[in-house]
Amino acid sequence: MEHAVDITLTVNGTTVSRRVEARQHLVDFLRDELGLTGSHVGCEHGVCGACTVRVEGAIVRGCLMLAVQANGCRVETVEGLSDTRELARLQKAFHERNALQCGFCTPGMLLAAQDLILSSTKPSREEIRQHISGNYCRCTGYQAIVDAIEEVTRG
Amino acid sequence: MKAPAFAYAKPASLGEALELLARPGAKALAGGQSLIPSLNMRLSSPELLVDIGGLKELQGISLKKDLLSIGALTTHAQLEESSDVKTHVPLLAQAVPHVAHAAIRNRGTIGGSLALADPAAEYPAVAVALQAVLTLKSRSGERKIEAPGFFKGLFETDLKPGELLTAVEFPLAKPSDKHAFLELTRRHGDYAIVGLAACNDRFVFLGAGSTPTLFSFKGDLQSARTKLKESLHPNPDLYHSAAAKLHLAGVLLERAWNTLSTSR
Amino acid sequence: MGKAELPLHAPGTKTDRGYIGQSVPRPNAARLLQGRGAFVDDLRFPRLSHVVFFRSPYAHARIKQLEFKKARIAKGVIGVFSGREISEFCTPWVAVLGHLKGIKSPPQYAVAIDRACWQGEAVAAVVAETRAQAEDAAALIEADWEELPAVTDMEASLQGTEVIHKELGDNICFARRHDTGGVDEAFAQADAVVEETYGFGRHTGVCLEGRSILADYNAAEHSLTVYHSTQAPHMMQDIFSRHLGIPEASVRVIAKDVGGSYGIKVHVYPDEMATAALSVMLRRPVKFVADRLESFLTDIHAREHKVRIRIAVKKSGEILAFDLDDLTAIGPYSVYPRTSGIEGNQVVNLTGGPYKHQKYRGKLNVVFTNKNVTCQYRAVGHPIAVALTEGIVDKAAAALKMDPAEFRRRNLIPDDAYPYTFPSGVKFEQLSHHKCLDLLLEKMNYRKMREEQIQLRKKNIYRGIGLAAMIEVTNPSPAFYGVGGARISAQDGATLRLEPTGMVTVLCSVTEQGQGTEAVLAQIAASAVGVSLEKIRVITGDTGVTPYGGGTWASRGAGIGGEAVLQAGRALLSNILEIASRILSVEKETLALESDFIVNKLTRERKMPLEELGRVAYFRPDTLPMNFQSELTVTRHYTPREYGFTFTNGIQASYVEVDTDTGFVKLLKHWCVEDSGTVINPMLVDEQLRGGVAQGIGAALFEECLYSPEGQMLNGNMADYLVPMAGEMPDIVCAHIETPTRQSQLGAKGVGEAGTAGAPGAVMNAINDALSPFQASVTTMPFTPERILKALGKCP
């Protein structure tokens, strides 16, 4: 039985192949093997949301998925979604409303917000709060983030 | 915290998976939403992780004559999106949004939740309330067990070494059935302090004991509340004494009863 | 009175304040929005190694034996080190300061030697090629312990049956008594005396980015570069230099992006000192990032207090006196270099703050325990002082059957009473309590809310309104730390450099952790010089590059760093106009700089673009007069001198609904009216208030570091320690009054901590207001459902 496994996956549109330790979780793989340091590690128990990335189009906790489980998958991170401009409207609204301060929660928060925007038409503030309730932010108190997401869903 | 080293295998068939799971130190990896945090925190150190994520046999929701069969690998998100679940097992549909947050629901599975048997989890209580039937497979064959008998103690189920939970069957809701799912949490998505999955007169509490605790509602609300105090023995948690939990369970009992009495 | 020396340009014109007062988005947020920031854990270095610490599982234990044999030969291991080995490269420290009379603490080492004094204290270090390998090796260390009695209860600690550090004689780190005299007489004269004991749960910062440090020693140069998630790079430069024996200017500390700090990362952590020492020992870069579990065990905790407070009032509502007895539990060491006596000291300084009583007695005991160390965390003693004051004030108002807002109105220091010396000795330059109260009540529509409350009670809906008036310490002078002997700078500097293309680079010694320091400095620089905001670039957080200064803490960044930038900007403008007058052969007084152009001051006619001036000054000085030298880099420093602290004031309100069946509290809304002097960027100020309020709400409802009697932390993970998430937070309405300080031209006071200072008191008062029909009240934070149910008599 192997402790290290060969994997091939597509990250932000680019196919990559690496040999990884089975125990390495996805966000460590993205950060350490691929240098995509935009997704952050905040707790490694799946609670804070700082590691949120997209796998096969669905948001997941990068710390609760092993890199080997992403074999054959399509992975998208904040860098990729910035370059394709998929996050542009949200990023503009976040910027203008100061919906970020230290920026550590921001990539995960943007991924969670975009997930809501893709799946819902005009969520209420309550619904927005519920959807981002799995992303910890210590700096903003959340209101500016809710305002920014609300603006994008209305616009 | 980085997980300790383990070997990894991804079987292509259920048979192969069961062979691998028979090895000592082997653990099944499904959604990983409970297993991986415990690995990251070095709370468990399996020798071998058997990734069952690719097993087609464990996927899918199929409507049978008088039951809905849900594959163990069905994710919370798939349950949420399923019109069959909404229509035929409404109590389960009501419970799903309480499970953590979207990112967790995209990966976590019903099989994982049932097999872990966290006393504060939603599905074990729903399964007991609806008397769901679980299918367990091993190298030596298959058996079925009714939900109440499956949950034995704190994080303890009837799963034998080498056994894998492959599916759970729920009876289809009848038009006359009444359901309520209630949960008290400090924050949206938290583990329940105490919760209640009610179907007709079967009131099953979560977070009020080591396993889902069935309470048969008889008589009027007053007498039920009194009887509840005698029959429920919750464990305290970090923030709530047993007495506080008992009180909260009583509040949920009343609220569920109100919902059930007024629903059509 | 009036505003400080703004306007900056022609008074009464559109440009007179430049960008000051505008809500411009932060230029340095763009990279964070794309995940293209540079946090310490993002950096890559050749031969980078990782350190993991072997930590004591016991609250108090003697280290009998540590066996490293198996760990040393594990895969990827570079070395395994004991506290004694590391002490040869890093000297210990004692966290005491001269102005806290009698404060005592034993020496603390980077890695403990002989004895561990709290669960989680590092007793050995493992360095390996990867973090995972280091953790694997740490699991192979064999340790032989002798468990010692753990002191965990604060009252038992004070009693001293078990003394943690025998050489100190008792467990009292610091004690203080303040007495104006006449207190007993005031209580004797009172028409009503109200007393209460309040409890505050120990809690912690939970920065999303764990503490992070990457130390890079160059053996050839005997120099050290440290990439550090810290608020105070110069302070750390001094400390690394002295404790590692490296010349000061050979130590460079760089703080790039910092993922939240709130005071947590302004202290000296033994494991971070050890990391730096290990880089010296191993002659290669060493990185340490505290993971979440060790963060809970070792990031400073704060605010564990039990306080008895009494208030004496006349039936007119006049407060005669406060009397306070504060017992607070810290860890086994006072934390370096600011000491763990400051939080309690602030409680004594600030309780009763907004009010005009004359008599005051405050007693403080700060005791050691075998729990994690504690030190300054956002708002320091204010949340306690404000909750005590505003809690007992509400009780006094109730005893007199007076509306809480009216009671405050009768007692707040009048807006024209300044300068004012408060009974604890602190001095206020100019506050605006009444203006703030008026604005708050108007914004809330207080009357209407009270009427609505009465109507809803008839329907068994129990809502509460809670007020909390406050004063807040900002922009401290050397009186805070320097006078006690700490090498913590209370002054800051800014260098402004005009680049040849007309851009301006700002180098400033205050730092950024997300509050918007760099944006604010850019706005000030652009305004002072007369260039457009896009032309400014700001560099902070690098001791090799910026002037020497204190960094950002105690809400000093805008007021102190900003003032240095303002003055440097004005001086740079003057120098630019000197050059322009030579180039254009006109009198300097006829010129101004406006939106990147040299203009005629009166006619506003554009004479020359700034980039042209830059070209001439840098590349064609041969065209300028013979004895003329352009000086396009200017540095200015600023120290607040007149007042020990520049106090601000504000008032908050919380509106809650209490479910009296479950004890759950729903936060309906929150208001914050704040006077922080000149507001440079209203959006950033509002967001500081909101973030601060959320942290205060966390303390009031959710957060507590729970310890067993044996000193084991019970909830040290993100699932069990409850931080506020989006689902439970209210919308927060912010409003401002601006009373500039006259100590600076900018007039800006600080605001970073105000939200946290007032929110717990406001929420407590709101809950108790909601519970008042039941004659029930809660006094111990956090107000869990169980505590509320107990107050209501619904569960034993």
Image (spheres, rainbow, N blue to C red):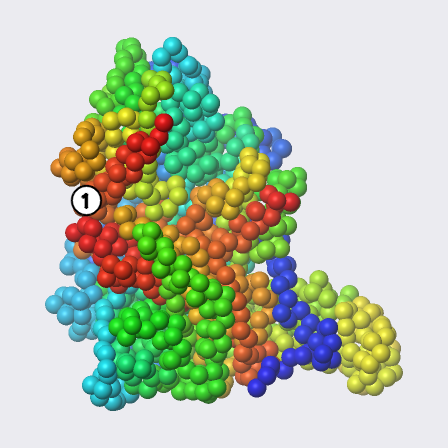
The quarter of the rendered structure image containing the N terminus of chain C is bottom right
Query: Residue at position x 41%, y 46% from top?
Result: A43
> Where, by quadrant of the figure, is residue C408 drawn?
bottom left
What SS does tag 1 mark?
A: helix
Q: Is residue C555 left or right of residue C291?
A: right
| Residue C104 percent across, percent down from the top left | 26, 75
Query: In the displayed structure, would residue C432 be above or below residue B170?
Result: below
Query: Residue at position x 38%, y 49% from top?
Result: C292
Q: Is residue A55 left or right of residue C772?
A: right
Q: Is residue B114 visible?
A: no
Q: Is residue C699 left or right of residue C256?
A: left
Q: Is residue C422 visible?
A: yes
Query: Residue at position x 42%, y 29% from top?
Result: B76
The amino acid sitting under disc 1 is: Ala
Q: Chain of mark 1?
A: B
| Residue B24 percent across, percent down from the top left | 28, 23
Disc 1 residue crowd, few under 14, some 14–19, many 20+, Cα 10 Å: some
